[in-house]
């Protein structure tokens, strides 16, 4: 007890001494008073200027759905409420006119804006007009850059930009892609410079690349993403020296651990000078890796500012005290102000070309798995995107209506599906289901619009189209799983099935249509009533099994009696128009569809089985049941070629490096070739329209290879799943197409379906790569396709959705098609990528059915097929069905229609990527040149489009060229564009060719390679189709 008492006495004595010392530090009669913080600072020449940029990074779905994040629901997952963020920020901005905030995700802002009072809306508009609140990026979401198609990127950005223009009259100036996992060339030039953005900022680049750029002061560059458009479409690009959060010690959300400035002299822990010193040290550290005297601090991170005062209070104090200190200058800023300051410095900036893929944040953590993650969602997004393009065209031909079905819900659903945790496949399962449900709801609305528009056009275009009932068209969204009730229905006496086939592309198409039918005695006629060649192909066991299970899973009911055959026939469809076909019961004595000749390789005496009715022949070895040779009799291309499947076992993270393969990261542990478990014979189906080769490799991998009589490529439809997991090992399924070509480690992958970028195995253009993951580190995203070439031939593979791919061996292309894993990769999603489909309480792994397309050409000839077929794959023909008695429908309706002049088709190198009537009656038109400079000897040239022939039934009164998102006139955008100095640019900057201005009399639009031009068109009157 004695020693304890002594210790207590010492403690009180020490405390008393400190109290005496503190009393001596305080002036006599000191008291705490109101401090008016001076936050008026602007830029100060000659000092380091620290631009404080308050922001909140608000994911439009990730761990929670978009609406759960907005209202703050499901907080057991994460306490995040965007409604609170916006309420709180607006209130804080109104308290001090010097404070600033940037907002990015318009999907959230639009939700908030709808619920505000007229009085508050006026105040918010004042904040926007004064520059206190600035919209940055301005799309509905911060889109992913690896897995979306460029048309979807344009559409989602346009939706956000049009909202900002309509409500605030503002045009965003800056791209803010701070979180996507790698950055595409298309982002730089198309979703950057072509929008009129002056700069682009992001955080995530490869850890090796960042280390070099920090060392060389090359974090800020001029990025020329397109070889074809070069300096005419360049953008100042800033890469953050760390993540998109503040420097350590400067985060101020409630419960954050950074010490606040304590400037009340009556309280303990007064620390103004300490915190100012911390600030100055952090500023100097960043200035040492940045050119010019301007640095930017991102004051915020994910879902911050739910109580905005906790941030602004501290920033007010830092600006006040740091500027009193005087060593550096602190100011409230935005990326626009920062960009202008960088531009005014007249610095020469290093040049960056190509892109920032793949991204790794750690030696064994390449974020290349998400290029394929959730392949069903990726496929659904792509299917709905093409449907949206067609639906908008049909809405335009019919005339936009304020009542009735529209494409608006599908537009919104597609827009948020481009988010970097949506189509990327890196969200939680319940969130993926939410995105899919939104797409489904949007589709149902658009489906009604498409049906009514086709009915309207077929009636109004007919010469006798009066006094009959409105056609009821049905469509088949589950046609991919062989389910199509209108085509499966047994045709009763005198009834026939009308198939209307719509083509959204600007050129005539001849393609094979396949629909399931229940009756083998059917015949097909074209719109003139002439019998055409048709072929019946028995449905495979895999198709029937998929149909049975997935129809029950999707619709909650078992499908009716399964159809027996696919009916295949060749359809010819005019540009931006439709054709009609009649499927009837064959008369006993008349012509009928040809039933395929079915043949198996079992017991075959031939060594080789030849497949193909036209120029293309595929040779299979009967003994091994494998593809062996590719022969094109027209082009005289002959090549040995093999195709195989294998899988990577996903690393479980239990070795020395705990990095597992997961939704984001691809980290393979080994490779297993998928071989037939016993020798399974090939089944070959031959007929006058196409040949098919059916292969069942094992119980969960099968494929059908199709060779169409009139085409020179092979279509491979694969069915993968359920991936077996009873061994507890995650699997990542790939296919390989292998030739003997000598490709010298080089291959080419597309950027968001647009430019092709040269890739070299184990090599990076910008730094000396240290190879840690020779497989995952050579994977790249592909939305259109991949090709390889040598001095004689080129092998191209096109895809129907985003996938990851590579060329890991010379002469070979590899695609990853499906993934099922058992470990989280520790990048925040906190859930394993193990997709299942359930009926009642029974669940099984997700089965994926998809397609890829293979062609071999003489070198220099492949681009024509890649570009044309690429458009056709991305915009499949749209089918609608109705029934008729006898010939009553065909006699009273227009069986063909083209929205453009019947004598006209777009040039083969041009596509219409948007044709849409806007709410104000103007028409939004986008035309895209499909080729790069030097890509093709015939098509990499200037091309012309005649607007008068594109709109033959309407009188054009005015054509205004706009920015890509149609929120400003192109001429104004170009006049405002900042000019940047590029290191060494004068010597090597080639002259860029662009299409010239549109003559108002001739109305001829000129497009240069890779150019996309956007127009708003006014018509004197909207002359109705058929009136």
Image: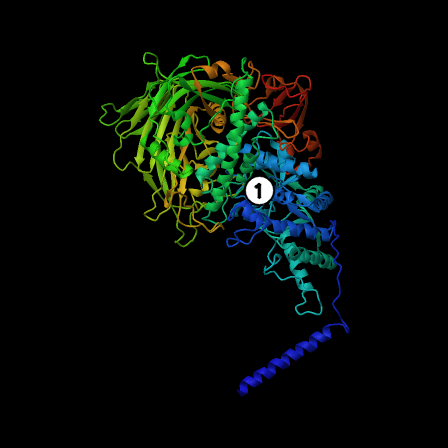
In depth, the one of 342 and 250 nearer the eye is 250
Which image quarter: residue 856? top left
**Among the 4 quarters of the image, the one containing residue 112:** top right
Residue 569 screen position, x and y as percent: 40, 20
Task: Kindly give the residue lying farthest to the bottom in the view shown.
Answer: 2
Give coordinates of residue 333: x percent, y percent.
Answer: 69, 48
How packed mark 1 is, by other alpha carbons closer than 10 Å (few <14, some 14-19, many 20 or more), is many
Image coords of residue 787 (percent x, y): 45, 30
- From the image, tell me which residue sits under label 1: 142
Image-based side of 364 in relation to 84, left or right: left
Q: Nearer the viewer, residue 989 or 596?
A: 596
Q: Quadrant of the C terminus?
A: top right
Residue 67 seen anywhere in this rendered image of the structure: yes
Q: Secondary structure at mark 1?
A: loop
Residue 307 to residue 577: above or below: below
Tell whether 643 sits left or right of 124.
left
Q: How is the image coloured?
A: rainbow
Is 862 above or below relative to 312?
Answer: above
* Res 980 seen here: no
Q: How many marks?
A: 1
Q: Position of residue 849 (x, y in %)?
A: 40, 34
Q: Nearer the viewer, residue 659 or 705?
A: 705
Is residue 838 toward the left or the right of residue 243 in the image?
left
Rendered image quadrant of residue 710: top left
């Amino acid at each position: 007890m004695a020693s304890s008492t002594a210790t207590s006495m010492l403690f009180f004595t020490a405390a008393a001494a400190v109290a005496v010392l503190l009393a001596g530090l305080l002036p006599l009669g000191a008291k705490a008073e109101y401090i008016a913080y001076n936050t008026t600072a602007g830029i100060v020449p000659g000092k380091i200027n620290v631009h404080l940029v308050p922001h909140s990074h608000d994911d439009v779905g990730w761990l929670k759905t978009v609406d759960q994040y907005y209202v703050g629901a499901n907080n057991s997952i994460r306490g995040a409420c965007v409604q609170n963020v916006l309420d709180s920020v607006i209130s804080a901005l109104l308290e001090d006119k010097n404070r600033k905030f940037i907002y990015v995700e318009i999907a959230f802002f639009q939700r908030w804006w709808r619920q505000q009072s007229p009085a508050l809306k006026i105040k918010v508009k004042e904040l926007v007009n004064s520059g206190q609140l600035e919209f940055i990026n301005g799309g509905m979401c911060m889109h992913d850059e690896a897995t979306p198609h460029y048309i979807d990127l344009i559409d989602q950005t346009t939706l956000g930009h049009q909202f900002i223009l309509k409500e605030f009259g503002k045009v965003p100036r800056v791209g803010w892609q701070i979180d996507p996992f790698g950055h595409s060339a298309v982002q730089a030039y198309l979703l950057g410079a072509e929008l009129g953005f002056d700069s682009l900022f992001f955080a995530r680049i490869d850890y090796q690349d960042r280390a070099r750029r920090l060392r060389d002061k090359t974090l800020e560059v001029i990025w020329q993403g397109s070889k074809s458009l070069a300096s005419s479409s360049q953008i100042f690009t800033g890469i953050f020296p760390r993540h998109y959060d503040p420097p350590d010690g400067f985060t101020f959300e409630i419960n954050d651990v950074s010490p606040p400035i304590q400037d009340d002299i009556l309280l303990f822990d007064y620390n103004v000078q300490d915190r100012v010193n911390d600030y100055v040290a952090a500023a100097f550290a960043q200035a040492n890796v940045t050119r010019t005297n301007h640095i930017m601090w991102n004051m915020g991170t994910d879902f911050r500012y739910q109580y905005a005062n906790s941030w602004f209070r501290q920033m007010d104090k830092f600006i006040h005290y740091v500027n009193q200190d005087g060593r550096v200058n602190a100011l409230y800023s935005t990326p626009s102000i920062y960009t202008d300051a960088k531009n005014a410095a007249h610095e020469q900036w290093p040049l960056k070309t190509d892109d920032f893929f793949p991204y790794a944040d750690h030696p064994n953590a390449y974020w290349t798995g998400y290029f394929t993650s959730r392949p069903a969602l990726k496929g659904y997004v792509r299917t709905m995107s093409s449907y949206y393009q067609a639906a908008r065209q049909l809405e335009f031909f019919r005339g936009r209506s304020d009542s009735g079905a529209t494409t608006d819900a599908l537009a919104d659903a597609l827009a948020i599906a481009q988010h970097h945790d949506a189509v990327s496949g890196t969200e939680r399962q319940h969130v993926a289901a939410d995105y899919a449900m939104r797409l489904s709801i949007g589709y149902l609305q658009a489906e009604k619009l498409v049906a009514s528009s086709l009915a309207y056009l077929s009636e109004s275009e007919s010469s006798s189209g009066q006094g009959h009932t409105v056609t009821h068209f049905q469509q088949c969204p589950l046609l991919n799983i062989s389910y199509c009730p209108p085509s499966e229905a047994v045709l009763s006496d005198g009834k026939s099935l009308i198939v209307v086939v719509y083509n959204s592309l600007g050129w005539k198409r001849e393609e094979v249509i396949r629909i399931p039918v229940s009756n083998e005695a059917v015949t097909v006629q074209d719109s003139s009533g002439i019998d055409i060649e048709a072929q019946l192909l028995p449905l495979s066991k895999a198709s029937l099994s998929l149909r049975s299970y997935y129809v029950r899973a999707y619709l909650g009911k078992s499908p009716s009696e399964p159809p027996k055959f696919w009916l295949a026939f060749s359809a010819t469809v005019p540009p931006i128009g439709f054709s009609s076909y009649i499927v009837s019961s064959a008369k006993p004595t008349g012509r009928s569809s040809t039933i395929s000749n079915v043949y198996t390789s079992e017991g075959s005496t031939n060594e080789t089985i030849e497949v193909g009715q036209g120029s293309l022949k595929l040779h299979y070895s009967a003994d091994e049941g494998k593809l062996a040779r590719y022969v094109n009799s027209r082009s005289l291309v002959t090549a040995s070629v093999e195709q195989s499947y294998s899988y990577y076992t996903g690393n479980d993270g239990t070795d020395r490096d705990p990095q597992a393969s997961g939704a984001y990261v691809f980290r393979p542990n080994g490779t297993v070739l998928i071989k037939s478990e016993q020798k399974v014979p090939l089944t070959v189906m031959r007929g006058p329209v196409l040949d098919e080769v059916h292969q069942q490799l094992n119980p969960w991998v099968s494929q059908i290879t199709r060779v169409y009589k009139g085409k020179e490529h092979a279509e491979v439809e694969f069915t993968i799943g359920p991936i077996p997991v009873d061994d507890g090992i995650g699997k990542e399924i790939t296919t390989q197409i292998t030739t003997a070509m000598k490709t010298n480690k080089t291959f080419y992958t597309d950027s968001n379906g647009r430019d092709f970028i040269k890739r070299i195995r184990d090599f990076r253009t910008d730094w000396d790569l240290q190879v840690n993951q020779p497989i995952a580190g050579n994977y790249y995203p592909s939305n259109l396709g991949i090709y390889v070439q040598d001095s004689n031939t080129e092998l191209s593979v096109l895809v129907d959705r985003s996938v990851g791919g590579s060329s890991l061996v010379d002469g070979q292309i590899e695609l990853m098609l499906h993934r099922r894993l058992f470990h989280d990769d520790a990048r925040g999603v906190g859930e394993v990528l193990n997709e299942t489909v359930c009926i009642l309480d029974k669940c099984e792994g997700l089965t994926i059915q998809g397609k890829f397309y293979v062609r071999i050409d003489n070198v220099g000839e492949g681009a024509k097929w890649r570009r044309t077929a690429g458009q056709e794959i991305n915009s499949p023909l749209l089918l609608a069905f109705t029934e008729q008695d006898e010939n009553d429908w065909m006699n009273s309706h227009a069986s063909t229609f083209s929205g453009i002049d019947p004598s006209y088709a777009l040039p083969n190198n041009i596509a219409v990527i948007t044709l849409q009537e806007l709410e104000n009656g103007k028409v939004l038109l986008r035309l895209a040149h499909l080729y790069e400079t030097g890509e093709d000897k015939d098509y990499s040239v200037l091309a012309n489009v005649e607007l008068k022939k594109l709109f033959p039934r309407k009188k054009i009164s005015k054509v205004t060229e706009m920015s890509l998102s149609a929120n400003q006139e192109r001429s104004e955008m170009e006049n405002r564009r900042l000019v940047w100095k590029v290191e060494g640019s004068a010597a090597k900057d080639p002259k860029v060719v662009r299409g010239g201005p549109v003559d108002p009399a001739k109305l001829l639009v000129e497009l240069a390679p890779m150019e996309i031009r956007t127009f708003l068109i006014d018509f004197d009157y909207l002359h109705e189709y058929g009136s």
